[in-house]
Image (cartoon, coloured by chain):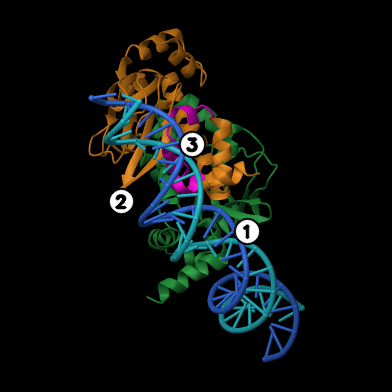
Chain colours: A green, B orange, C blue, D cyan
DNA sequence: GGTATTTATTAAACTGGTTTAATAAGAATT
DNA sequence: AATTCTTATTAAACCAGTTTAATAAATACC
């Protein structure tokens, strides 16, 4: 769990004692490609850390798959909305590859935060990090064209295009497979 | 500061002692209509609580005003991105009406969090609340048409339309004044 | 290795927005 | 009350996406 430890310490100082206390609650878990960590209607009571693999986070709205995120190595993830609000999820978490995660239950997260001010701070700061990511996401959605968002994704997460089918990436970018194909054609003609 | 106190306690239990400790740092401040709490290039070192009034949060990108939010009574606000990342702001915070706010400096927020685990928890939970708001915002931007977003805003914050000029609301919705006008016409014809 | 299935591209018709510019309506100022 | 300035609507031409459907390419499977 060295990578998990390092990721936590990249947010804030955590003493060895507190770290050890926290990490004891994490368990290793594996998911085969095509299996689900979560389906609509279920409650999510785990937080995950992606060790190796790829999980997509999506809803199906009026028959259309709407990909919200691809979680790859080093991501903390869950259906954070359902997790926070303690409601039935409306989303899928599906392994797009064989995946290895560390998982901690919601109750245990609470125990960890109650026990350690430092780790509660880590919790606050990781929420802040999530805020920053969503802030950029919103600004991208508002201010960039689809073409610009495609190019930006290509630049920021180039390996995604080798791992994930294009129609899912189209969905992630908020357009249809046809639309993305047109954009790619337009770009290749320059 | 009764409203501020109540808002904090709506997140989590805070003892009288901790609450008193925290509230001591807040100062009342007023801004005349048309004045700025923040301009691009400045560092923001305050968090605000809106007591009475309305402040718009916007950037100007290639000459276009891009309204990201209208802060009205009961909102905690700041340029959260610049605040968290400790960078020069790229945004404006402008009073659209004469406004009264309570303000606390970043250093004092840190003091409060260091002193009180309960208030640090409030900090984490209010970050979570912000997450939930942004989560909805992203889903709205991705899944709803402009017309649907207009109707939703009309339903959720009807008074905004009496307080704020329509071209700013258009910007908030991510379209041009012409575009919003067309949508309104289309709706009125039904 | 051939067949079936999934994924990606292309074309054509359509749509909801854009830009630009003119006009109308409303608010503020003198 | 008249003038000026700001805000909202309308029209026309345009454009980047959509939908639907057909085709092509790639992948999986028996």
Boundaries of the magenta span: B158-181
Element on which disc 2 rests: loop
Residue A115 at what x, y percent from top left? 47, 25
Find the distance from the CA under tag 2 to the CA under tag 1: 47 Å
Alpha-carbon neighbours of circle 1 within 10 Å: few (<14), some, or many (≥20)? some
Quarter of the image for residue B60 reads top left
Element on which disc 1 rests: loop
Alpha-carbon neighbours of circle 3 within 10 Å: few (<14), some, or many (≥20)? many
Residue B97: tell me if it is visible: yes
- Disc 3 + disc 2, Cβ < 8 Å: no
Residue named by callout 3 = B131
Residue named by callout 2 = B62
Q: Nearer the viewer, residue B10 or A123?
A: B10
Image-based side of B147 in relation to B118, left or right: right
Q: At 40% across and 60% down in the image, what residue appears? A: A148
Residue named by callout 1 = A32
Q: Which mark is residue A46?
A: none
């Amino acid at each position: 769990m060295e990578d998990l430890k390092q990721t936590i310490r990249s947010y804030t100082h955590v003493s060895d004692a507190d770290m050890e206390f926290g990490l004891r609650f994490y368990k290793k878990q594996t998911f085969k490609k095509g299996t689900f960590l979560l389906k609509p209607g279920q409650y999510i009571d785990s937080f995950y850390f992606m060790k190796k693999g790829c999980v997509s986070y999506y809803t199906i709205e009026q028959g259309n798959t709407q990909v919200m995120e691809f979680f790859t190595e080093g991501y903390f993830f869950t259906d954070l909305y359902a997790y926070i609000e303690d409601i039935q999820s409306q989303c899928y978490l599906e392994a797009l590859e064989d995946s290895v995660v560390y998982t901690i239950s919601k109750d245990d997260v609470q125990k960890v935060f109650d026990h350690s001010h430092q780790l509660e701070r880590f919790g606050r700061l990781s929420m802040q990090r999530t805020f920053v990511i969503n802030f950029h996401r919103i600004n991208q959605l508002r201010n960039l064209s689809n073409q610009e968002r495609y190019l930006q994704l290509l630049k920021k997460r180039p390996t995604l295009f080798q791992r994930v089918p294009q129609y899912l990436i189209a969905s992630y970018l908020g357009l249809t497979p046809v639309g993305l194909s047109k954009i790619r054609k337009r770009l290749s003609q320059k």
